Structure formats: structure tokens, C-alpha cells
Image (spheres, rainbow, N blue to C red):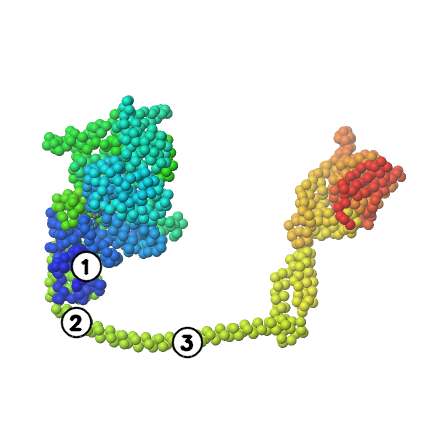
Amino acid sequence: MKFRGGGNCGSCGLRELPANPQPSQIPCVCACKPTAIPNSLCFCLQGLGANGIRLTMESALTARDRVGVQDFVLLENFTSEAAFIENLRKRFKENLIYTYIGSVLVSVNPYKELEIYTKQNMERYRGVSFYEVSPHLYAIADNSYRSLRTERKDQCILISGESGAGKTEATKKILQYYAVTCPASQQVETVKDRLLQSNPVLEAFGNAKTLRNDNSSRFGKYMDVQFDYRGAPVGGHILNYLLEKSRVVHQNHGERNFHIFYQLLEGGEEDLLRRLGLEKNPQQYHYLVKGHCARVSSINDKNEWKIMRRALSVIGFNDSEVEDLLSIVASVLHLGNVQFAADEQGNAQVTTENQIKYLARLLAVDGSVLRDALIHKKIIAKGEELVSPLNLEQAAYARDALAKAVYGRTFSWLVNKVNKSLAYKASEPSEEKFPGWRSTTVLGLLDIYGFEVFQHNSFEQFCINYCNEKLQQLFIELTLKSEQEEYESEGIAWEPVQYFNNKIICDLVEEKFKGIISILDEECLRPGDATDTTFLEKLEETVKNHPHFLTHKLADQKTRKSLGREEFRLSHYAGDVTYSVAGFLDKNNDLLFRNLKETMCNSENPIINQCFDRTELTDKKRPETAATQFKNSLSKLMEILMSKEPSYIRCMKPNDAKQADRFDEVLIRHQVKYLGLMENLRVRRAGFAYRRKYEVFLQRYKSLCPETWPTWDGRPYDGVAVLVKHLGYKPEEYKMGRTKIFIRFPKTLFATEDALEVRKQSLGEALTLAVDFFVKTTKMQATWRGFYRRKKFLTMKHSAITIQSWWRGTLGRRKAAKRKWAVETIRRFIKGFIYRNHPRCPENEYFLDYIRFSFLMNLKRNLPKNVLDKSWPTPPPSLCEASQLLRRLCMQNMVWTYCKRISPEWKQQLEQKVIASEIFKGKKDNYPQSVPRLFINTRLGEWGLQSLTGGRKGGLMNSFLAGNSFLTPHLFGFNTGREEINTKVLQALENEALKYAVPVVKYDRKGYKARARQLLLTQNSAIVVEESKIKQRIDYSNLTGISVSSLSDNLFVLHVHCEDNKQKLRLSTACLPPLVLSLSPVPYSRVVGTKAMILKNGLSFQGDVVLQSDHVIETLTKAAILANKINNVNINQGSIKFTVGQGKEGIIDFISGSELLIAKAKNGHLTVVAPRLNSR
Ligand SMILES: Nc1ncnc2c1ncn2[C@@H]1O[C@H](COP(=O)(O)OP(=O)(O)O)[C@@H](O)[C@H]1O
Ligand SMILES: [Mg+2]
């Protein structure tokens, strides 16, 4: 038989065993008789797993006299504190340290190692229903974890209790449980490591030896563990509460400073200590010897140092960060050794220069500034700085305040740093991307100080006990709520429970204006001489009538004796506590003189620099007091806890001597009271002592009723109804809920359990026989099944092999055929290539077809895009002729498509271009430049067009030829530029359609003076206009020819018939003076009519006209077409002669040069120097 401590009997698997049982205890504790009831029978009765490790809570009921009940709700006399404590004692004696009150776990510190935290034990609790296993914190941990996973609701486990009761150990054990049982992966392992390793670091800096606990946490801790959707821990976050900073500078007798100081001195390497200016001996440091127990045999500082250093690395500290951190630790020790002496005026002076030197180096500040700051006080009043020296007492206060501030802030920095290393780096979809999706759920662990009552209680106890009041309030509220919810969901009437609501005490402490914290703050902040005593007086004044508040002055004669004049008493839910007001104001103010703050702000130690923010100096607002900060952080904590589903672990210590197997009843009673356990039990037992799901209840007790034994086929509800009727339950003893049976009194359940025991005994022998028979038949069945299955297996194996080989053959044949085809194709191709130049024959047939096919396919992909595109793939020799045919066809097709797209305007444009080409191509130097420029109908006001048509070389023309049709016909109409012609000229031209207009320069024939004119071409004549005057009109019939040079100049001569030269213009109609018009008796219409007539008949001309146009090719092409003088355009080399009038002749000489130059030469000729544009 194998016994497992703290688990269940290895024989029957039913009984709960003491954690570390003595061999002699086992049979009697377990009460199972191995010979009478073999293992198999127990399983049979239980219907539980074959490993026999599970045990139900009910199983322990028969052994209750010895090991007590596992759940206090089963206590007969649940209102009796004595019964409660007796049950605890019984269990503690048997090393059963855990007991439930419903779902709350009560834990008693064993002060010895029990073998109940093994990996094997963790596995036992994994995924098992709460009541199937004996009470354990693993059951609480597993239950919360499962709720978190199945309901995806955040959970929290609240662990509370006195100092030394085992809260921190419980937290660590729960974390270990998750580390072992939760799914793992590389990333998760790192997080698990960091979660576990955060403990040694925070404990080194935040824990200390106290009288009650060698490793007492001197701060409250709330730790969130984040789990991903697979249930793996992926991150964490820690909140810390109220570090007991006063310990840095003072420790009570028998207590120590924070562990880190001793660890550093004991474990730090020689080199490191030298750098930090420290000696190995803690006795050298004032801050370490106040408690007179720097070295304690129960603490191995050297070992702890190693663990802490390793943990720092796991968390992600690099060497320089470690050095910075330890420099701060060392600086606190040096600060403690700073001494002062008074000068003649009584002002403090630093006497320990050496310490200042070290401090300056370690804190990376200016030594002299620090020294000054330690002995002076700086105040800013009305914008002015006032510096005053400190006396000895004040200097010591300032020094200690600095040490506390530096240490306290570094601790908060450390928590932040740990948080950064624990932060979850999400790789899954985030909540912002997918609203409603929660990638992680959170399980919080609260390890916070329990209720504290000392001989002398100060500010810290006040805060701690206030925190416990808040937690108690939350605890009662939530327990009541969940009870009520369960009753409701089960359809059972809720009977109101009487309980003490401690809201009245919470209000007394925290209420605005009237609460103790408000009054304390007011005293701290008010001007004048506020002292702890004035604070007490103010309290007496404000809350004197409160039933939970008492002072010496307010007490009656009898009670007064137990109260000092400097004390006040609060009646907490857990009992009365008397607080001394001494130090309340100082601790609440938590003051650090301004110049010390300034010095720290200038520190170059990166950690100190982050801890002391410059904004503190400029911030006009007073920093929040310690109590208000604590109050606010508590209220946030309450919010956090309220949003989660809570589980509770209530820790107790059995004695003050930290000894195993010592159960101090007085101490336990004290804690039962202070933890409010009786209250808790009363709430839980308000209605019914016991409740179970119908299935579970029926499974256990079905053997007690012939109708339900051995099986019940109907609904479990009906089965239980039949069962309880058979057992004779009275109506007031139980209630049937929707899914559970509720039993009011424990005695009803015990009677049922006893009946079951008897029943088991009587069934024993018969069942043994039955089991023997069952075993034998089972063996036979197994042999036959084995044979049958093997035969079947062999047939199937054979079939599988046949199918496999056939299918492999098929696949092989398919592959071979494919390869053969590939080889033949390649061979044919190579042969074809060799015979490619032979006439078509069977050898090259395939190759030639392939080549043709590829050429045609290639051609299809690479056909020319437009008529200008001359590309064409090179055909194979056998397709040359076909390729040419195709090319022609393709070109015809493109030309046809192109022509179809030509608009009438473009046709006209192209015709004009063709005529220009006929006239000028190869003859005039600047013809090529004109080719890409479109001919348009007006050049007046052409700035827009010019840039469009002339700006891009070959732009529009090529673009059109390429098939782009973005040009719109309005370019060729006469809308643009019409407004540039004077309206009088337009009126004179009347109906005569304007065909072309261009600005020109006219050279007069005598002095060759250049004058700006407009040249208008109509259907019948060319007209030279000067603003509103028509200067010359040349009927096309009179135009004998046009002369132009072969060079790049823009000059041309319109030769006019000689006779016409004699005609004189008597009246320039276009410039009829307004006077004439107004004086004339002839109506204006008639005058205009006369003008029109005169114009029609032609104006007077005096010889040929010498003009210059920037668009000479365009102008002359248009003129030649309109005047039908295409063949009369003469392109001259050298010079042009023209008629000046009355038989006189003028000569223009053209020569090539570098720049255009037009000037009258000495010989009277007009000389035109034209730049050479094209090399001919
Ligand atoms: N479950 C336990 N088993 C064995 N020893 C324990 C257990 N819980 C606590 N202890 C002992 O009690 C000491 C104080 O426990 P701790 O968790 O630090 O108390 P608290 O955090 O409540 O002040 C531990 O150092 C350890 O020696
Ligand atoms: Mg602790």
C-alpha cells in the first residue's frame, strides 16, 4: 500500500490523509479496510477514475471526528467560535492546513515543509472539480484558472492575513502551479521565468525580517497574470502599495532593514564593494544596526544575493543598470553614516566628508551642492528664495527624509522596470482591430497586509487596517452577492442574512471633509503650527459622536484608563485598535526639502534622474499626502477587484514563535476574529449547509435506495427525489433547486454518509464475489476480443498492402509514359533543327510547324502599334513571303483605320501640309521646323496655341499621326483671336469670310522701316491692317506672285499687278473719322455700305508689299492656296527684286550668317542676314 501525504489513501483512493502521516495513523485515519473492500470495489462505488487519486469531500465525513470537516459549512454548530477553532486544531494536528468555508480557503501556516506541493500533486488538482479533491490552494488556483478559460472572465485571488501567516508563500505557490500546469512555449517560458523571478527581486528590496516574519513583505502587492486564448501566461503587471519607508532609517529591536542591504554586503564581490565604497561588515552602517540583529542564522544573505542577481538578469537588467541600482542602495548606507556637528550658532555642519565624497559619486551629483542641501532649507515665498541653516535635529531629519525618498522612489522604479519586462507583446489581433475580441484574460493575485494590532500602532497600522476594512467590505459584498445569485439561479427563496456592514468605519476614515484622512490632510496643509496634538484635537472636535471613535477625552471614566492622551481608538470590524498620533503629520506629509529635491533632479544616475522629475519643482500644487495617495490607490484597487471574479485565501499563523506543530488557540481566535471568518461562515451558512449537483449526489448515494441502485435511467433530478424520499428527508431539511439539491443541516448529510458506510460494509462480500466473477469474465472477453481483432487486423493489413502495390504500379506506369513522350518530343525537335534547311520532310515536319507556330504567336503579340511603328519580327526563312504579305495587310489595315479616324479639319490640315511640302520642301531652310507645327487659322492672340503647337517638337503632328485624337476641331476654327481684330475692320469686311490672320511686319519700300501690321486673308484678297485702318487690300486676281528666300528668314514679297499700283485710295473707309460719320447727312448704314463697295473694288496700292511673318511657311501656304498661286511661289537664292511703284525697283539681298539681321545697306538694298538652320 502506498501512502501520499496530504492526499488520499492509496488503497481506496477515498479518504483524505494528513499531509505527512505517520505510518501508524493511516488505516485509522483512512478508515478503509483493504482486505474487506479492495480498490476495484471502491472505484465501482465511486464511479471514479481508475487511478484512485480522487476523493470527495464527503469521504472525509466518516473520519470527521479525527480530521475535522473539510468545509466549515458542515459544522453542526456553525455560530460557535469554539467549534470553528476546534475543527481547525484537529486538522492542523493532522497536517491538514487547508479548510474551506464554501469556496473560501482558510490556510494555517505549518511552519514546516509539507510534501503537498509536488508536481504530482499539482497534476492531481489540474482540471478536477472543486469538491472532488481535498482542500488546497491548488484547487482555488485551478478553479479560477478554469473559470478564466471557460467563461473568459477576469479572475482575482485575494490572499489576506497577518504578517507571517503565509500570504507571500501562497502567492508564490500559486504562480508555481500555473508555471507547471499551463501550456508552454518558448515565449511563454520566458514570461513564466520572469513572473517567478520578479519575486526574489521585489522581496530583496521590499521584504525585511520583522519580529513576526523573517521574510515579511513591507509593501502591498497586486499582481496581474495575463493569459492568452490558449491559457498560456503571456504577461503580467504589478501594482505596489505603501512601502514601509520608515524602515530604511529605523528598525525596532529584533528587526532588520530591507534584505537588499545585507545581501549586498554579504554576497557582493570584493570589486563591487570597493567601487561602492562599502565594507562587508553591516555593523559599520547606522541604518543597519538599529534593530541589533544584522546577522540572523535563519537567513542566508549570501545565497539570497546570488538568487537575486540571477533574477535581475532574467528580468532583463544589463550590467550598467545593475550598477546604477546598487549605487543607490550603497548611497542609502552612506547617507546613514553622514554625521553632523553644531557650530557656534547651533547650525549643523557635516563632519563626515568621506561619506559626501562617496555619495556624490554614487548618486552622480555635485558633492558640495549635496552637502549644502543637507544642512540648509530652501523655501520659495512670493517668488523669492529663502535659504536658512538647519539645526542638528533638522539636518538629521533632512538626511533621513532623503534616504527614505531615494529608497522609496527606487523601489517604485524597480516595480516599473519589472512591469516593462513582463509586458505582453501582442502578436494576435488587437482589440482595436477587432472590437469585442479580447486576446488576453487576467488573473490577479493580491498579497496584501492583513489586519495589524500592535502594542504601539502608528500611521502605517492605520493605513493597513483601513485597507483591511475596505477589503472586508468588498469581501462581504461579493460573497453575499454570489450567494444570492446562486439561490436565484436555482430558484430558491433568499432569506436575508444579518451581518455587520462596516461601511460606517470606512466612511469614518475616508469620507470627504469629515473623514480622518481629510482632517489629517487639512492639518498637514494648513498654515500655522499644526502638530500631531492639534490633529487629535481636530479629530475630537469633528468626529466626537461617531460610535466607532474614541479618545482619552471622549471616553468614560473606566475606558479612559486604557487610552493615552496622545491616542485615539477605532472600533474596526475586527476589533478595537488604539493608534498613537505621534508622527502622523510627518509621515503623512512625507516631506523632502526643496533643495534636496533639486540636487536629486540634477543627478546623472539614470535611475535617480527618472525618480526625481523636474516638474515637481515647478509644480505649484502641493503633492498629495501619503494617506490620500494610499486612499486613492486603494479605491483604484477596489475597482480592479470589483471587475473580476474573486476567490479568497485567508491565511493564519498558528503561533508567534514561527514553530511547527504549535497551535496557539488565543492567537488563532484573535485571527479568526480579525479575518471576519465567523461572519463569513454565517453568510455562507445563511440558508443551507450543503449543496451538490443532482448527478454528483445521485452517483454517490444511489446504493442507498433500491430504485436508484445500481443504475437510474431517468433524470438525475427525479432520481434524487426518489432517493431523498427513500432516505426519509423531512421537507424542512432540504430544497430541490434547478440543478442542485440544497441540504439545510449538516446532520442530515452526516446521517446519509453514515448510512452509506454501513451499506458499503454489507455490500462488501457480495460485491467481492461479483467483482471476481466480473474480473474473470472480463479476462475471457479480453482474450477473445484480442484474437478477433488481430484476425481482422491481419486481413485489413493484407488488403491495404494489395491496394498500395496496385496503386504504386499505376502511378509508376503513368510517370514512365509521360517521360517517354517527353523524350520523343525532344528528340523530334533536335532532329528537326538539324534538318531545318531541308525541304519539308518527315524529319523536320514537327520542327518547322513549331517554328511557324511560334513566329505567328510572337507576331500576334508584337504587331506594330501604329503607322509610324516600323518594327516587325524577323520571320523564319520558310515564312518570309507570308510575313511580307501579312506586313502589307497589317499596314493597310492600320492606314484604313487611321484614315477612318481623320476628321474634315484634319484632312484640310494635311492637305495644306502637303501643299507646303510641295512648295517648300528642300527649298527653304526653315521649312523642316514648320513641319511638326500645326497650321491654324489665326495667329492673333495665339499665346495659348503657340505653346501648345510649337512647344513640343513634332508634338501635335506626330501625335495625330500616331493615332491620338485629343486635338479638338476648335483649334482650326476662327474663334480664337477674332477679338484681336479691330471691330471697325471687321465691320468693313462685313460678310467676307476671314480665312487667316497673322501679325506681320511690313517694310516700307523707301526706307525699309519696319511697322507692325496684321495680315488678313479672306476668300478674295489679302488685307494689310494697322489697328482700325485697312492699309492695303490686294485682290488675289491682282497678285502676280510671291517671292521668298531659300534661307531661314521670314521675309516675303507679295508681287502685285502693275496697273493696280496706280489706283489710289481716296478714302480709307475703315478709318472714317467719327466727325465725318456724325456730320454726314447720309445714314451710317449707307456710309458703311459705301465702304464695303470701295473695299470690294480694291484699295490703292503703291507697288509690291514686303512683309515678314513668324509663320512664313504657314502664311504663304495659306495665301498660295487661297489665291490659287501654288505655282507662283518663287524661292530665290541671293536676292529678290520687287516693284516700288512707278517703274522703280527695290532689291532685297539674302545672305547666311549667324544671326537674323534686317537692315538697309549702303547700296540702298534691304539686306537680310539669316541664320543657317539646316546643313544641306
Ligand atoms: N505553506 C507553507 N508551508 C511551509 N512554510 C510556510 C508556508 N507558508 C508560510 N510558511 C513559512 O512562513 C513564513 C512566512 O510566510 P510569508 O508567506 O512570508 O508570510 P506573509 O507574507 O503572510 O507575511 C515563510 O517564510 C515560511 O517559512
Ligand atoms: Mg508577505
Q: Residue at x 63, y 72 (%)?
A: 834
Report how far apart the C-alphas of labels 3 and 2 lie in the structure: 49 Å
Residue matched to label 1: 4
Tell me if 865 is positioned left or right of 308 in this view.
right
* 688, 767: nearer the viewer: 767
What amino acid type is highlighted by mark number 3?
Answer: Ser
What amino acid type is highlighted by mark number 2?
Answer: Asp
Tell me if 833 is positioned left or right of 1130 in this view.
left
Instruction: Say if residue 1156 shows up in the picture.
Output: yes
Q: Secondary structure at mark 1?
A: loop
Report how far apart the C-alphas of labels 3 and 1 lie in the structure: 56 Å
Percent coordinates x, y for residue 872 in the rendering: 66, 61
Residue matched to label 2: 772
Q: Residue at x 36, y 30 (%)?
A: 369
Query: Is ligand 1 closer than 8 angstroms to the Cβ of mark 2?
Result: no
Residue matched to label 3: 805
Report how far apart the C-alphas of labels 2 and 1 lie in the structure: 28 Å
